[in-house]
Amino acid sequence: MKERTLVLIKPDAISKRLSGVIIDRLERLGLTIKAAKVVTATDALIRRHYAHLAGAPFMDDIVAFMLGKFNDVEDSRLYAFVFEGPGAVAKVRGEAGATDPDKALPHTIRGAFGQIKDGVMQNCLHASAGAQEAKDEIKLWFGDI
C-alpha cells in the first residue's frame, strides 16, 4: 500500500546546506517525491503545526527556531516535501532517527547532522509520526493534493 508522509527540512539543515543529502537519503529508501515547495513559514503556521505542544514552556523557542532566527535563514524558509511509497512513515522516521539528536543513532540523519545548540534542539527535519498525522500535516502544508 502506498502511504504518504510529510517531511520539513528545517532551518539548521538549510543553513548547513544539507538539503540535498537529506533528500537523497530519503529517495534511496525507495520513496517518491509527490510534492515539494519552498515555504515562507509564519508564526501562525508553525503554531498550527505544533498545536500539540501549545502551552509548553519551550514553544516560543520552537517557533523562533522554525522561523530561522537561530540559523540566520532568510525569509523564514523551510522546504516541505510529501514522500510516497510503501511504509513511507516508518521508513522516513527510521532514517530520520530519534527526535533528540543526542539520542539518535549516529547513522541516522539527526544523529549525523543534528545538535543541541544554545539549549535549542536543532534536528534537521520534521517527519510525520503516524499515518493520520501525515494526512493532517500534508493538508496543513499543501492543502488537498
Image: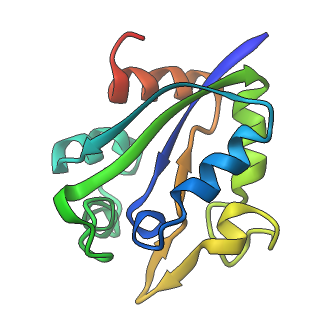
Q: Height in image: 121 above or below 19? A: below
- Quarter of the rendering containing residue 133: top right
Q: Nearer the viewer, residue 95 or 79?
A: 79
Query: Count of labels shown?
Result: 0
- Quarter of the rendering containing residue 103: bottom right
Q: Nearer the viewer, residue 103 or 95?
A: 95
Give me the residue at 57% from left, 38% from top.
128
**Hey, which residue is sitting farthest bottom in the picture?**
118
Give me the residue at 57% from left, 54% from top.
20
x%, y% of residue 31? 72, 29
127 on left or right of 79: right
x%, y% of residue 78? 35, 50
Q: Height in image: 103 above or below 133? A: below
10 on left or right of 102: left
Image quarter hosting the C terminus: top left
Q: Height in image: 68 above or below 47? A: below
x%, y% of residue 70? 30, 77
Q: Nearer the viewer, residue 90 or 27?
A: 27
Give me the residue at 28% from left, 66% from top.
68
x%, y% of residue 44? 17, 43
Image quarter hosting the N terminus: top right
Colouring of the image: rainbow
